[in-house]
Amino acid sequence: TGYITYDPGFVNTGAASSAITYIDGDAGILRYRGYPIEQLAEKSTFIEVSYLLIYGELPTEAQLADFTGRIQRHTLLHEDLKAFFSGFPRDAHPMPVLSSAVSALSTFYQDSLNPFDEPNVELSTIRLLAKVPTLAAYAYKKSVGQPLLYPDNSLGLVENFLRMTFGFPAEPYEVDPAVAKALDLLFILHADHEQNCSTSTVRLVGSSEANLFASISAGINALFGPLHGGANAAVLDMLEGIRTDGGDVASFVNRVKNKEKGVKLMGFGHRVYKNYDPRAKIIKNTADEILGKISGGDQLLDIAKALEETALSDEYFIERKLYPNVDFYTGLIYRALGFPTKFYTVLFALGRLPGWIAHWREMINDPQTKIGRPRQIYTGHAARDYRPLSER
Ligand code: CMC
């Protein structure tokens, strides 16, 4: 069947054509639908960026109001879906809780099963954008043993999520605008990143014509791994480990360079960026400000800065073009906002959701889409004859 290219990890394989996100990894450039990430970070909002990614253009005022209103109408979960949260162990990691709950949406919304039914794909899109923050907040409440809160649809998407996460039923909850703004910015920076592991997973699962909920659930599971979205939590564990060991950054860097098993500089390196990750640059600039405002400084931030400085001037990292990626500073900010480490990757999933949806919709509408079906180089036995049990 012809010539097969061997490309483990798809380092050189273009598996899709896409008009959503542009990255120049050597120059450190990232644009959503042509707009530089720096401008979107400074001037836009997460809901506006979600619209941009999914529909291709920034919304007009009327379009934004309509989009926001439709999302607000769908934030409630089916009461029966809430039962899921009592079924999981109390100390369950919130990522598999989230992916299971998103997968379960297909069972509640059976009108979503046909991926070519455009009105229902649109409805599934809105349902996801509206319900995933509620699901994420419930996963959090479950993990801390607190009662679930219904959404308050007079609030914006991020404010509503914060209230459902940190509020209590009988008490008013004042959303801190600095916290909401910080989270909104982080969501913008995570909203899309072309063919990363989770987005490629969403496209691959979707290429079999599985529905949007099933495909997004698969994407959440791909994001869970520490080399991908799980890196933001792994960075915090690493920084805390260094602090416990007395804060000796240089000796930790030496362990990384000696390739000690399981010791990597988490939050460093990227398949595409061979330059400073532009998202990390924006986060670094705001980390100080946000951390100063919210928590009055953080010792782990000092360790992170020392680690970055040491690595950036070290031959090992220079040679390999290893720079901080988006996950290097985000955990510190999430920590300052009050989230436990286990929850950081859920926040990444909330941010990446519109990107996954945009890619699934682009894939399903692309006449060139075929079922994703890689080939392999077979390395097993040549043909051999079966031997009965008594002769083995
Ligand atoms: N610490 C130490 N060495 C590293 C690191 C690191 N973080 N990243 C790459 N290297 C080394 C690697 O050992 C290899 O060295 P050598 O040539 O001597 O074998 C060289 O750099 C090239 O690395 P690679 O593993 O071939 O690169 P990749 O493109 O396959 O992997 C990566 C990219 C992001 C998985 C990897 O850099 C990594 O594991 N980083 C740490 C985890 C992390 O921060 N992930 C978040 C990525 S960004 C956002 C997201 O996707 O969530």
Image: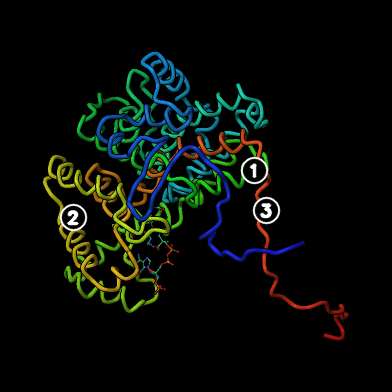
Circle 3 sits in a helix, a strand or a loop, which is it?
Answer: loop
Residue lying at the far bottom of the rendered structure: 391
Q: Amino acid at mark 1?
A: Ser
174 up-or-down from 228: above or below: above
Residue at 19% over, 63% down: 309
Residue 349 position by quadrant? top left
Q: Amino acid at mark 2?
A: Leu
Label 2 Cα neighbours within 10 Å, binned few <14 / some 14-19 / many ≥20:
some
Residue at 45% over, 50% down: 92
* Residue that numbered label 1 is attached to: 207
Disc assigned to residue 363: none
Horizontal side, residue 132 vs residue 368: left or right: left
Residue lying at the far top of the rendered structure: 62
- Return the disc, 1 or 2, that comes first in the chain's sequence: 1
Disc assigned to residue 373: 3
Circle 2 sits in a helix, a strand or a loop, which is it?
Answer: helix
Image quadrant of ligand 1 equals bottom left
* Residue that numbered label 2 is attached to: 301
Q: Nearer the viewer, mark 3 or mark 2?
A: 3
Q: Are marks 1 and 2 in contact (CB under 8 Å)?
A: no
Horizontal side, residue 2 vs residue 384: left or right: left
Q: Is label 2 within 8 A of ligand 1 (CB to nearest ligand atom)?
A: no
